[in-house]
Image: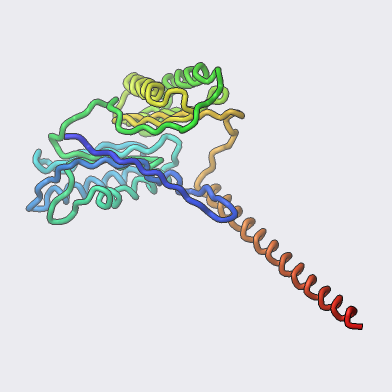
Amino acid sequence: MKLTYQFFIFWFFLPFFAISGDDDYKNLIFKGCANQKSPDPTGVFSQNLKNLFTSLVSQSSQSSFASVTSGTDNTTAVIGVFQCRGDLQNAQCYDCVSKIPKLVSKLCGGGGDDGNVVAARVHLAGCYIRYESSGFRQTSGTEMLFRVCGKKDSNDPGFVGKRETAFGMAENGVKTGSSGGGGGFYAGQYESVYVLGQCEGSLGNSDCGECVKDGFEKAKSECGESNSGQVYLQKCFVSYSYYSHGVPNIQPLSGGEKRQHTERTIALAVGGVFVLGFVIVCLLVLRSAMKKKSNKYDAY
């Protein structure tokens, strides 16, 4: 039995200005739900699943990865993991992971008289949770779950070579880097190519490197010379982006800094709109006054 995966893209249109806020890492990327539900006349499976989510969310405030088994009976036990992206702070990791339990119920159903799905995975931009009932079919760590490719080619004769070098840097980087909870993470650039690799914490350095390498191979075969790509495997994910004018030198902001930046952007934008409106009103009043004055002189 396999999980059925669906991909979600969100577009936001804002008048006058756009805001990149704190919550980008909580955007939904994809979800996978098993077709089978677990018969649960006693409610034990549901309680085990609830306990599993509680434990995973709790541990996400201190670590970027955890694996938990809830229940002792093989027929009702549930195994689950969470993984946060390596560049998230603990508070952001917790915030991200804590959103998923409700999403599992919403996106995959369950929780009622008909029971819960026996396995599910919900992947947000900054974290994911996956769980499965004891005895659920195991899949390869390099099985591809989802991929997204950019719609445009790079049109750079040297793109393939640059991307290949960036991929090699990431493959080596995840072996030596650490996301804080075990499991490699790497984000960096080579010339005009930005690249990211992340492994689940259950993988050792060598296996992580192999998983990321396989992810990049799939990115090349699936996306060709597209200017961007994201590939999600069972136990790792990779992405790359090409910038024709060079990778933007944008320093990552902490949650508080982002919030202050967002509030300052909103204040400036709203203030600018107000001032512009005030000026327009003044000009209209002045124009009306001058027109009346002109009409007055014309009457003589």
Name the residue at the left extreme: 41
Q: Could you tell me if residue 205 is visible in this image? A: no
> Does residue 19 lie above or below 276 as drawn?
above
- Residue at 74%, 70% in the rendered image: 284
Q: Quadrant of residue 280?
A: bottom right
Name the residue at the front extreme: 299
Q: Nearer the viewer, residue 24 or 298?
A: 298
Q: Quadrant of residue 196?
A: top left
- Residue at 85%, 78% in the rendered image: 295
Name the residue at the bottom extreme: 300
The quarter of the image holding the N terminus is: top left
In the image, taking residue 228 as reference, residue 37 lies left or right, namely left
In the image, taking residue 266 as reference, residue 35 lies left or right, namely left
The quarter of the image holding the C terminus is: bottom right
Q: Nearer the viewer, residue 31 or 169?
A: 31
Counting from the top left corner in percent of width and height, residue 107 is at 27, 49
> Does residue 125 lie above or below 241 as drawn?
below
Q: Could you tell me if residue 75 is visible in this image? A: yes
- Residue at 58%, 28% in the rendered image: 244
Q: Quadrant of residue 32?
A: top left
The colour scheme used here is rainbow
Looking at the rendered structure, the number of numbered marks drawn on it comes to: 0
Counting from the top left corner in percent of width and height, residue 217 is at 38, 20
Counting from the top left corner in percent of width and height, residue 84 is at 37, 38
- Residue at 42%, 45% in the rendered image: 92
> Does residue 166 lie above or below 201 as drawn?
above
In the image, taking residue 260 as reference, residue 235 lies left or right, namely left
> Does residue 219 lie above or below 267 as drawn?
above
Counting from the top left corner in percent of width and height, residue 145 is at 30, 32
Q: Nearer the viewer, residue 266 or 220?
A: 220
